[in-house]
């Protein structure tokens, strides 16, 4: 028996700021990262509201009774409360309470995929029928820091159940984890810190590539077996570089590469990319998905798309829908939304 | 004073060494030097360690004791020497004085810097502490900008070109490609240098030395005892050390370093040689213009002709004097406290004819030139193969 995705949904706030607008204010350079715009949460939005929106979309596709959802997990590094879960807000909003478990998960940008693995375990062991795993962030950054050029807002939600009901079967998962301090936020500090160049080679690339290779080794797969590949996308450059090193043509990566238009949605990043691929993929196609969380670790998944994708796909707004739904704002408005409202 | 010889050398690879700590680097370089000299820790009587700013780079002061402790050398005296980027060269001079005076026989001179544990901005700020804080750093001057001023003046007075500066980078990166310990193994052309991003005009990215981690270590002994340890001792024939105004604005001239002239003349006099006697030199090319000024100030060519001299290949293999065969600070890397000692490692390899593809054939006299700041400290040493 295998677990699978029975429903998926995303949410991206309507506001966008051009990266060039940020560069204009801080005198930085925009080149090299491959980003045009990034999403900005509105005045009444935060990680919890975005997680709710995405999960409602996932439920619309799954068409399951919310009372059958036995676990609601929200993976995030920007919960509205330091103590008090965002997951209970989501569970309540979708009608899964009170006979369910809920918790927030933290593992930088890969907490959402760690929650997917936990849901797989609970489903496969028969403890629950369905589990919800959300990756959601309203990413924090110090004004003017390099992170400000990419830190964005968004959510992606996955309902995990048994393979018979799945629109995509999770054929296998493999994780690669080490203690690598490339990016962190200490308790009580408002903004995260990062190790500059250290975030590349010994952090992102080492974990993404090792996890992808480990998955293929463990399940006897090769890069040719995959029709699509989705990697955590902190910028548009890293995923393409990782693909190149793994021997994957960029045509397999581009369909899921949405970072250029919305920025890095942190915990939602790779899950958003996967949703963009599910919006397009055909039955029988295989997807490689590898998340990355600083600190550091990667979860790799091999997913096989089933016939159900056709009937499910159009039951909720696509990633494309949200990408096109946009209102551009200037740095002043952005500053009010991102920094002043948050205080 | 007794004659002093180098009986062993060792260094780590230079680079962005995320896997190795300050302590790891020092031990690695030290063990290599001891193995090269064929001695054990019990033979060492004193140590001098060049280090610019462990306090700011890794929040660790008191590194003399740390190194003695961590290497198992305690309770021997271990002294940290600081003179910004000339810390390593000055540590060697202290070690040389110690042996020459007869106080100790077997003495270590080492240098180390661990710079990449902080972000580039913090590293640049730390390096800027080697400039005059009140008159330079506080008003925003960084080393690239100060050397850019010198480069502009050199271009104005002598017609030195950006292409000539680029020729320094091309030569040194080419040498670095032959040095397994170098930070960079990349192909650099004049065109690539000219097209690299501007840092402080006219200096571009490929005119600048990098931020690096690394350590180097050499073992000194009285010359008369040196044959006990090695068949190929290298004599320290001359040592010179001079200081100048800390700030660049106090100098009489911007197109050269007076301290280089003074330190080198002192060293030449002690060694009884002329500049033209030097076969191979490791000079402080923190920026390409710095090498051009160095070869002029050291007397390898006339003032103002360093650019042309370089462009003609006179500082390359087959030229009048081989300059920076290790790759220099530019290509080998520049862990500031280690640089002055790593220069000695290369010169010793050259004089022992162990430098592989980058070997200058028949090299008998070598020179090291180590600069702190914009030339407020300069240390020059002259070496000769012992016959």
Image: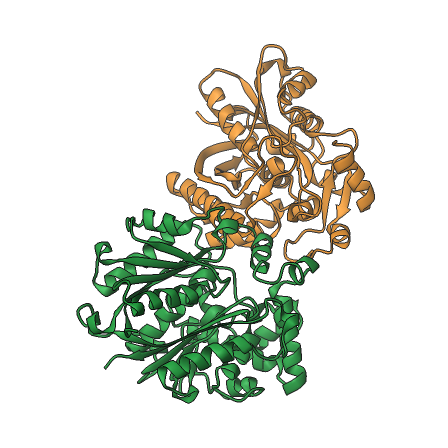
Of residues B39 and A337, the one nearer the viewer is B39
* Number of numbered callouts drawn: 0
What residue is rendered at 62% in x and 51% in y? A236
What residue is rendered at 50% in x and 38% in y? A295
Q: Residue furthest left?
A: B228
Of residues B193 and B234, the one nearer the viewer is B234
Question: Can you give x and y, in whole percent of width and height, for residue B132 in the image?
Answer: 62, 62
Q: Which quadrant of the figure contains the N terminus of chain A?
A: top left
Q: Residue furthest top?
A: A99
Which chain comes out green in the rendered image? B
* Display colour scheme: by chain
Task: Report whether residue B257 is seen.
Answer: yes
Q: Quadrant of residue B338?
A: bottom left
User: Which color is chain A depicted in?
Assistant: orange
Q: Quadrant of residue B6?
A: bottom left
Question: Can you give x and y, in whole percent of width and height, for residue A77 in the image?
Answer: 60, 32
Of residues B195 and B229, the one nearer the viewer is B229
């Amino acid at each position: 028996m295998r677990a699978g995705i029975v429903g998926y949904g995303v949410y991206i706030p309507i506001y966008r700021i051009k990266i060039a607008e940020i560069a204009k204010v801080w005198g930085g350079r925009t080149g090299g990262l491959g980003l045009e715009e990034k999403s900005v949460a509105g005045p009444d939005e935060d990680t919890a509201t975005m997680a709710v929106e995405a999960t409602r979309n996932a439920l619309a596709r799954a068409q399951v009774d919310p009372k059958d959802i036995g676990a609601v997990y929200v993976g995030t590094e920007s919960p509205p409360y330091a103590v008090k879960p965002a997951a209970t807000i989501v569970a309540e909003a979708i009608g899964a309470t009170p006979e369910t478990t809920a918790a927030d998960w933290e593992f930088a940008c890969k907490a959402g995929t760690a929650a997917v693995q936990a849901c797989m375990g609970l489903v496969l062991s028969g403890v629950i029928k369905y589990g919800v795993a959300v990756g959601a962030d309203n990413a924090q950054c110090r004004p003017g820091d390099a992170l400000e050029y990419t830190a964005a807002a968004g959510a992606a939600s996955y309902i995990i159940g048994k393979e018979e009901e799945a629109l995509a079967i999770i054929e296998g998962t493999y994780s690669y984890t080490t203690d690598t301090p490339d990016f962190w936020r200490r308790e009580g500090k408002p903004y995260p810190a990062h190790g500059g160049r250290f975030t590349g080679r010994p952090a992102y690339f080492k974990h993404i590539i090792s996890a992808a290779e480990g998955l293929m080794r463990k399940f006897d797969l090769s890069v040719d077996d995959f029709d699509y590949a989705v990697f955590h996308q902190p910028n548009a450059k890293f995923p393409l570089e990782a693909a190149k090193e793994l021997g994957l043509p960029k045509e397999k990566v581009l369909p899921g590469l949405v970072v250029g238009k919305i920025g890095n949605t942190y915990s939602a990043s790779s899950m958003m990319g996967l949703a963009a691929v599910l919006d397009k993929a055909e039955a029988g196609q295989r997807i490689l998905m590898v998340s990355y969380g600083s600190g550091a670790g990667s979860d790799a998944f091999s997913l096989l798309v089933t016939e159900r994708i056709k009937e499910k796909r159009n039951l909720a707004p696509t990633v494309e829908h949200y990408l096109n739904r946009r209102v551009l704002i200037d740095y002043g408005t952005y500053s009010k939304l991102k920094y002043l409202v948050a205080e | 004073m007794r004659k002093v010889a180098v009986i062993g050398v060792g260094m780590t690879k230079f680079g962005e060494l995320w896997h190795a700590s300050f302590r790891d680097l020092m031990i690695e370089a030290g063990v290599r030097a001891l193995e090269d000299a064929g001695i054990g820790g019990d033979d060492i009587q004193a140590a001098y360690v060049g280090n610019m700013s462990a306090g700011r780079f890794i929040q660790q002061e008191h590194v003399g004791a740390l190194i003695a402790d961590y290497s198992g050398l305690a309770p021997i005296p271990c002294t940290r020497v600081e003179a910004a980027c000339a810390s390593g060269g000055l540590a060697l001079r202290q070690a040389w004085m110690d042996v020459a005076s007869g106080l100790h026989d077997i003495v270590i001179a080492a240098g180390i810097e661990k710079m990449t544990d902080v972000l580039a901005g913090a590293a640049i700020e730390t390096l800027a502490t080697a400039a005059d804080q009140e008159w330079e750093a506080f008003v925003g001057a960084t080393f690239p900008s100060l050397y850019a001023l010198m480069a502009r003046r050199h271009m104005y007075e002598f017609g030195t070109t950006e292409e000539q500066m680029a020729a320094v980078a091309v030569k040194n990166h080419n040498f670095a490609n032959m040095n397994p310990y170098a930070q960079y193994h990349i192909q650099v052309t004049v065109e690539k240098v000219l097209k690299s991003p501007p840092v402080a005009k006219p200096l571009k990215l490929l005119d600048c030395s990098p931020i690096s981690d690394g350590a180097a270590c050499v073992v000194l002994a009285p010359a008369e005892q040196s044959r006990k340890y090695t068949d190929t001792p290298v004599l320290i024939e001359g040592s010179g050390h001079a200081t100048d105004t800390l700030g660049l604005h106090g100098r009489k001239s911007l197109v050269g370093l007076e301290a280089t002239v003074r330190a080198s003349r002192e060293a030449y006099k002690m060694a009884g040689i002329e500049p033209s006697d030097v076969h191979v030199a490791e000079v402080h090319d923190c920026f390409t213009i710095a090498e051009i000024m160095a070869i002029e100030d050291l007397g390898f060519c006339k003032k103002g002709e360093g650019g042309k001299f370089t462009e003609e290949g006179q500082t390359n293999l087959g030229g009048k004097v081989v300059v920076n065969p290790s790759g220099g600070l530019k290509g080998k890397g520049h862990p500031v406290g280690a640089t002055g000692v790593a220069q000695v490692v290369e010169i010793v390899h050259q004089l022992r004819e162990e430098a592989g593809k980058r070997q200058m054939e028949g090299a008998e006299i070598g020179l090291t030139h180590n600069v702190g700041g914009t030339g407020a400290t300069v240390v020059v040493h002259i070496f000769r193969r012992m016959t």
